[in-house]
Image: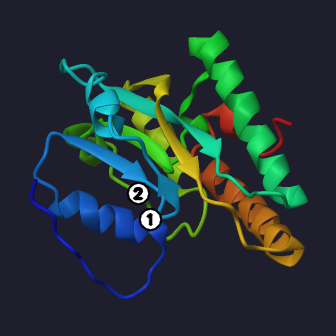
Amino acid sequence: FALSVLRQENAGAAAARHLGATRSRGRILLFVDDDMEVPEDFVESHAAHHTGEEKRVLLGRMRAGAGGSGLMERWHQLHLDRKAAQFSADRGAIRGNSMFSGNVSMRREDYFAAGGFDATLRRGHDMELGLRLEKIGARFEFSEKAWSRHAPDPHGLPWWRERAMLYGRIDRRIWRKHPEARHASPWRW
């Protein structure tokens, strides 16, 4: 396969992912975080879900890496495990605001029809794009087989606190952009 290395000023993950999407030539886009390990059949597992012309978004299972022992990291993995169990048990549970960009694939044309990642969002850009994909009729699926392993997170409690506060502010911005999506309201909890 052809491998291209793209460089740009650091403008966040959404901008980096969007640049990759704009330069891509394939029919399917597959996004993973920079700290993910993937198995040999990872691309094949994602591609198997995109054989037709249906608007489909595939969320792959994210597993914890070895050595992750911090309290917040364990809490985060528990959250991912609960989501995976919910998605496996009830396919209807996956809505646009459940989308995560650490392990996701979709048709390139659907990505651009929905407008791509919003680079102004430093966090939550995946959930916001998921809401727009939902609006254009994309169906969300989950796969245990298309798994990735998340490397241990080196951050401490102050970083996690700041991250939680940022997500709170971003959730409010997303809600303002999509007030019709009641399932995305930050007050849903």
Disc tally is 2
Q: Quadrant of residue 156?
A: bottom right
Q: Residue 81 vs residue 47: left or right?
A: right
Mark 1 surroundings within 10 Å by alpha-carbon count, few (fewer than 14), some (14 through 19), many (20 or more): many
Q: Mark 2 near mark 1, Cβ–Cβ under 8 Å?
A: yes
* Location of residue 4 with respect to 26 vertically, above or below: below
Q: Position of residue 82 (x, y in %)?
A: 76, 29
Q: Amino acid at mark 2?
A: Phe
Q: Residue 86 vs residue 149: left or right?
A: right
Q: Position of residue 160 (x, y in %)?
A: 81, 68
Q: Residue 10 vs residue 45: left or right?
A: right
Q: Can you see residue 127?
A: no
- Residue 104's label in the rendered image is none
Give the CA separation, mark 2 to mark 1.
6 Å
Q: State the SS at label 2.
A: loop
- Residue 117's label in the rendered image is 2
Mark 2 surroundings within 10 Å by alpha-carbon count, few (fewer than 14), some (14 through 19), many (20 or more): many
Q: Residue at x 85, y 61 (%)?
A: 70
Q: Residue at x 83, y 50 (%)?
A: 74
Question: Where, quadrant-wise, is the C terminus in this rendering?
Answer: top right
Q: Which residue is mark 1?
A: 14
Q: Amino acid at mark 1?
A: Ala
Q: Position of residue 88 (x, y in %)?
A: 61, 16
* Location of residue 180 with respect to 142 vertically, above or below: below
Q: State the SS at label 1.
A: helix
